[in-house]
Structure formats: C-alpha cells, structure tokens
Amino acid sequence: MALGIVEWHKQLAPAGESTAVFRDSAFAGDVAKTNLTAILQQHGRGNVRSL
C-alpha cells in the first residue's frame, strides 16, 4: 500500500507539502503502521499522522 501511495503522490505532483492521515484501526498492529510510515519517509513523504 505504501508504494502505491508514493506512486500516486508522484503522479499528482502537488505544489506544496502533503500530509497522509490514517486511522489506527486501519492497521493490523503497530508493526504494520511503523512499516508503512518508514516506507513513506524513505520516499520523502514525512508528514504521516494517525488518529
């Protein structure tokens, strides 16, 4: 899912910064959330929040 978000963001090419917001209940556990966040950060998408 994270790589799909990265590709989608590249296609959109927004002018400013973007923030990804996820619900905690969307993840199977903390490991899945940490992995998604790490992949997004590795690709320059550092603004990730969870509710």
Image (cartoon, rainbow, N blue to C red):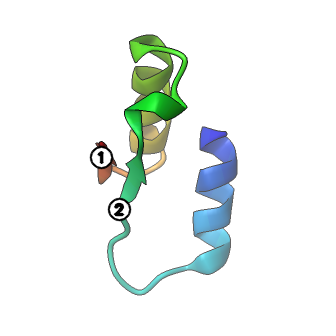
Look at label 2 and name its amino acid.
Answer: Thr
User: Of 48 and 28, which appears nearest the observer?
Assistant: 28
Which residue is labeled 1 in the image? 49
Which residue is labeled 2 in the image? 19
Where residue 24 sits: x, y (%)? 39, 32
User: Of 4 and 50, which appears nearest the observer?
Assistant: 50
Q: Residue at x 60, y 41 (%)?
A: 2
Q: Earlier in the sequence, mark 1 or mark 2?
A: 2
User: Of 51 and 36, which appears nearest the observer?
Assistant: 51
How packed mark 2 is, by other alpha carbons closer than 10 Å (few <14, some 14-19, many 20 or more), is few
Q: Quadrant of residue 18?
A: bottom left
Q: Residue at x 65, y 43 (%)?
A: 3
In this picture, residue 8 sits left or right of residue 27? right
Quadrant, the C terminus:
top left
Q: Residue at x 52, y 33 (%)?
A: 26
Q: Residue furthest bottom?
A: 15
Quadrant, the N terminus:
top right
Tag 2 secondary structure: loop
Look at label 1 and name its amino acid.
Answer: Arg
Structural distance between the alpha carbons of marks 1 and 2: 7 Å
Q: Residue furthest front?
A: 25
Tag 1 secondary structure: strand
Where residue 29 sits: x, y (%)? 46, 14
Q: Are marks 1 and 2 in contact (CB under 8 Å)?
A: yes
Where residue 40 sits: x, y (%)? 46, 43
In this picture, residue 7 sits left or right of residue 14? right
How packed mark 1 is, by other alpha carbons closer than 10 Å (few <14, some 14-19, many 20 or more), is few
